[in-house]
Image (tube, rainbow, N blue to C red):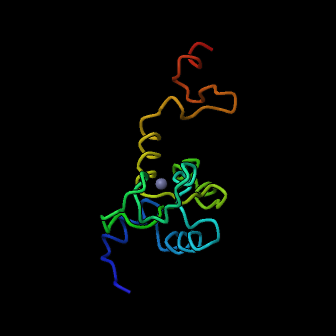
Amino acid sequence: MPSKTLHQRRATAQRGYGSKWQRARLIFLAQPGNQFCVKCQERGLLNPGTMHMDGSVETNPRRIGLVVDHIVPHRGDQRLFWDRSNWQPLCHDDHDIVKQREEHGREEQGNDITGRPTYADHPWNRRA
Ligand SMILES: [Zn+2]
């Protein structure tokens, strides 16, 4: 196994994607039902991580393979991070889309089950 530099190891661990995660994601992706991107499957495409979301062939070797995505963003929450019912296999295309929505869809973040924002400086909460 190629050994990583200390810098690389530290950078990986800081993101919460250490060797324990690398092992866990491989086991997850090897389980029945986890061989294809779930978003592509919704569109009727069985994509084992070798295609784009439109079905064309993925040629970038860095993007071949499936990403294990957290359905509910874990934001450092260890319970959410390691909860396998919160994991789903995605192709790189779909993973990028999910990440972009999480980063830009701020209005969807921090709401309780009724949709009420939970963060203190939201106008609803300031008025109350
Ligand atoms: Zn996909």
Would you identify the image quadrant in which residue 119 lies?
A: top right
Give the x, y percent position of residue 87: 59, 58
Can you say which quadrant of the picture contains the C terminus? Answer: top right
- Seen as rendered, the residue at the extreme right is 114
As drawn, 100 above or below 34 = above
Q: Residue at x 58, y 47 (%)?
A: 72
Q: Is residue 61 left or right of residue 78?
A: left
- Seen as rendered, the residue at the extreme top is 127
Would you identify the image quadrant in which residue 81 lies?
A: bottom right
Can you say which quadrant of the picture contains the N terminus? Answer: bottom left
Closer to the camera, 72 or 47? 47
Q: Is residue 54 left or right of residue 28?
A: left
Q: Is residue 125 left or right of residue 61?
A: right
Give the x, y percent position of residue 48: 49, 66
Q: Residue at x 45, y 52 (%)?
A: 95
Q: Residue at x 58, y 74 (%)?
A: 30
Give the x, y percent position of residue 49: 45, 64
Q: Residue at x 53, y 51 (%)?
A: 39
Count numbered badges in the picture.
0
Would you identify the image quadrant in which residue 27 lies?
A: bottom right
Give the x, y percent position of residue 11: 36, 64
Closer to the camera, 91 or 127? 91
